[in-house]
């Protein structure tokens, strides 16, 4: 996956780790990341005013009605911005007024209302 990172960004933010094909991300990036436990099915936004939510290989574990509730919570959490998920996950028809596709070849959506 790191092969897909543009070379100038890779060179700036990654250094080799002790194992082959393993890399350490720079402290500059690491310090800007906050790790928090969040049960999505609580349906409470972890925060609002977000510009991007990436949620990959998680919604597939939920029932369709749970997926819709979580997507509503994501929608409420985003200010002006985007939601991205894995290639096999689709936005349910009930949510198509809330998120519009940005590109044809990826599951990247823009909040619309
Ligand atoms: C197949 S893994 C995907 C991990 C990672 N997102 C990826 O794509 O490599 C599914 C993840 O969903 C998380 N998960 C399952 N139910 C969840 C819930 N109710 N709230 C938050 N995360 C949940 C699990 O903890 C697990 O890390």
Image (cartoon, rainbow, N blue to C red):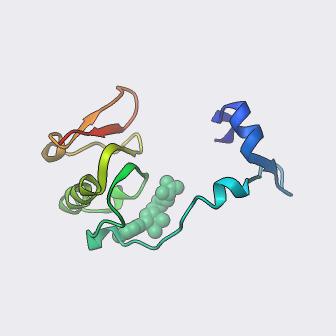
Vertical arrangement, residue 11 with respect to residue 45, above or below? above
**At which x and y percent is residue 63?**
24, 62
List the single residue furthest toward the top.
Answer: 104
Up/down of 46 relative to 83, above or below: below
The residue located at (25%, 60%) in the rendering is 73
> Looking at the image, which residue is at 72% across and 46% down?
13
Taking 74 as reference, is 18 left or right?
A: right
Total count of labels: 0
Quarter of the rendering containing residue 24: bottom right
Residue 21 picture location, percent across and down: 78, 47
Residue 4 occupies quadrant? top right
In the orientation shown, which residue stands out farthest toward the right?
A: 18
Q: Quadrant of residue 98?
A: top left
Q: Residue, x 69% and y 37% (percent of image)?
A: 9
Quadrant where the C terminus sits is: top left
Query: Taking 95 as reference, is 9 left or right?
Result: right
Give me the residue at 73% from left, 32% from top. 8
On the rendering, which quadrant does ligand 1 occupy? bottom left
Quadrant containing the N terminus is: top right
Instruction: Give the percent coordinates (x, y) of residue 104.
Output: 35, 26
């Amino acid at each position: 996956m790191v092969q897909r990172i543009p070379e100038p960004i890779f060179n700036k933010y990654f250094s080799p780790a002790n194992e082959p094909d393993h890399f350490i991300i720079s402290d500059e990036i690491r310090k800007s990341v906050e790790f928090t436990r969040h049960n999505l099915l609580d349906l409470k936004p972890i925060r609002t005013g977000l510009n991007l939510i990436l949620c990959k290989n998680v919604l597939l574990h939920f029932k369709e009605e749970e997926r819709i509730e979580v997507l509503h919570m994501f929608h409420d959490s985003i200010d002006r911005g985007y939601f991205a998920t894995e290639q096999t996950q689709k936005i349910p028809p009930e949510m198509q007024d809330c998120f519009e596709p940005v590109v044809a070849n990826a599951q990247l959506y823009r909040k619309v209302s």
